């Protein structure tokens, strides 16, 4: 449900929820575990074409959710990709029908480790099954079926969202004609795994974690989760961006040296960590970050068999200052996809903002997405 707003935004939006799997008809995960019921939160923007030829499905990053555009009544929080979606924007809702869903394992309306386990009446906690990127795709496909859709014009995602796009296109290429992968990876490096390991340790070593049963204990590992967010946020920004924004500026004109918040950058990170507590759950952070560590689709010898038989047109984008998922990660994907004879467009974009660039408004970046999507829509007609 959308309402046109000012400045090209879709305006007020409503998050909807669908029950896609039940205890009687559970979700079967890649590891063989069964999960039900499974509810999924999602939003849609724009109008579906009579022939359903204008659907673009969005896959969000690690700490995203279904709310990609517009505002919710009450909090008026803009969606995480609001600058991209709306009338006249690259994802023009006068022409595209956009679907955005919260991930399985999340904490913003979709079933995850913080949800109630019907077998116990308490939150799953660490009894929630481990997940795979393929499980995200299974749920995305179930949501499409729920919406009466069998094929989309494009699937688009950045970071972990790009991983979902890659897995989906490899496993079920018949579901889409175009795949857009931005600032993502097909296999994390040791450095990336190490960053996530430290973040998770901060959470699990928090005295209020209670082996994942913190909800039952009436507590929350807020210190650990905020530290995890602070460290991750550093990796999302480039050194130049941090220097330009903060340099070595003090937090206050007069301060006494010590171990408090003396520099502006320290205050910024502290704010990011505290704000994160209002919208994310520690268990979801553990589960979703761990999925990224294990992702390695090209390790399968038959990884490209399906998409080679039913080609998808790819757009791969990276940013020159992204050191979390550097251009080398995108070139690895390019190598595999081109090696299978698939149509791939690759572009490294210049941006001073590091990994977070995929979320920001940049003229060249948006023009690249617009051109690719416009062409895709023309080809579909």
Image (cartoon, rainbow, N blue to C red):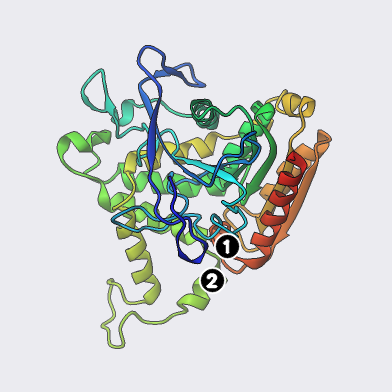
Q: Position of residue 56 (x, y in %)?
A: 60, 42
Considering the numbered disc 1 on the image, is that residue within a helix, a strand or a loop? Answer: helix
Give the residue pinned by disc 1. 354
Foreground: 26 or 377?
377
Residue annotated with mark 2: 241
Quick check: 78 left or right of 91?
left
* Camera-side residue of 37 and 348: 37
Across and down, in percent, residue 149 comes to: 57, 29
- Tell me the CA gap for discs 2 and 1: 8 Å
**Dividing the image into 4 quarters, which one contains the N terminus?**
top left
81 lies left or right of 151:
left
Q: Residue most toward the front?
A: 50
Q: From the viewer's side, name the closer residue of 142 and 95.
A: 95
Residue 121, relative to residue 199: is it above or below? above
The residue sitting at 36% across, 44% down in the picture is 201
Whether 160 is drawn above or below 226: the answer is above
Q: Secondary structure at mark 2?
A: helix
- Could you tell me which residue is drawn at 32 percent across and 45 percent down? 203
Considering only order in the chain, which callout, 1 or 2, is on the residue closer to the N terminus?
2
């Amino acid at each position: 449900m959308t309402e046109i707003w000012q400045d090209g935004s879709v305006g007020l939006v409503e998050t909807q929820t669908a029950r896609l799997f039940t205890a009687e008809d559970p979700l079967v995960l890649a590891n063989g575990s069964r999960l039900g019921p499974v509810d999924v939160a999602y939003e849609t923007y724009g109008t579906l074409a009579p022939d359903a030829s204008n659907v673009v499905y969005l896959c969000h990053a690690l700490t995203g959710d279904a709310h990609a555009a517009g505002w919710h009544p009450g909090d008026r929080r803009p969606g995480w990709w609001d600058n991209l979606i709306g009338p006249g924007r690259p994802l023009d809702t006068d022409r595209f029908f956009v679907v955005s869903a919260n991930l399985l394992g999340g904490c913003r309306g979709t079933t995850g480790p913080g949800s109630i386990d019907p077998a116990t009446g308490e939150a799953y906690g660490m009894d929630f099954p481990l997940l795979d990127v393929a499980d995200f795709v299974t749920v995305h496909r179930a949501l499409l079926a729920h919406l009466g859709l069998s094929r989309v014009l494009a699937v688009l995602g950045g970071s972990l969202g790009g991983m979902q796009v890659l897995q989906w296109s490899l496993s079920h290429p018949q579901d889409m004609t175009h795949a857009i992968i931005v600032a993502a990876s097909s296999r994390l490096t040791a450095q990336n795994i190490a960053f996530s390991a430290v973040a998770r340790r901060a959470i699990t070593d928090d005295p209020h974690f209670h082996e994942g049963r913190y909800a039952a204990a009436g507590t929350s590992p807020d210190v650990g989760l905020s530290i995890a967010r602070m460290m991750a946020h550093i990796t999302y920004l480039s050194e130049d961006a941090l220097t330009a924004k903060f340099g070595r500026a003090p937090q206050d004109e007069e301060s006494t040296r010590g171990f408090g918040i003396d520099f502006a950058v320290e205050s910024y990170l502290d704010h990011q960590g505290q704000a994160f507590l209002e919208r994310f759950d520690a268990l979801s952070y553990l589960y979703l970050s761990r999925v990224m560590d294990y992702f390695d689709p090209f390790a399968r010898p038959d990884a490209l068999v399906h998409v080679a038989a039913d080609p998808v047109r790819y757009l791969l984008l990276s940013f020159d200052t992204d050191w979390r998922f550097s251009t080398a990660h995108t070139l690895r994907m390019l190598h595999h996809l081109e090696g299978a004879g698939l149509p791939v467009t690759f572009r490294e974009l210049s941006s001073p903002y590091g990994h977070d660039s995929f979320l920001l408004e940049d003229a060249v970046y948006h023009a690249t997405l617009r051109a690719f999507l416009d062409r895709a829509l023309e080809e579909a007609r």
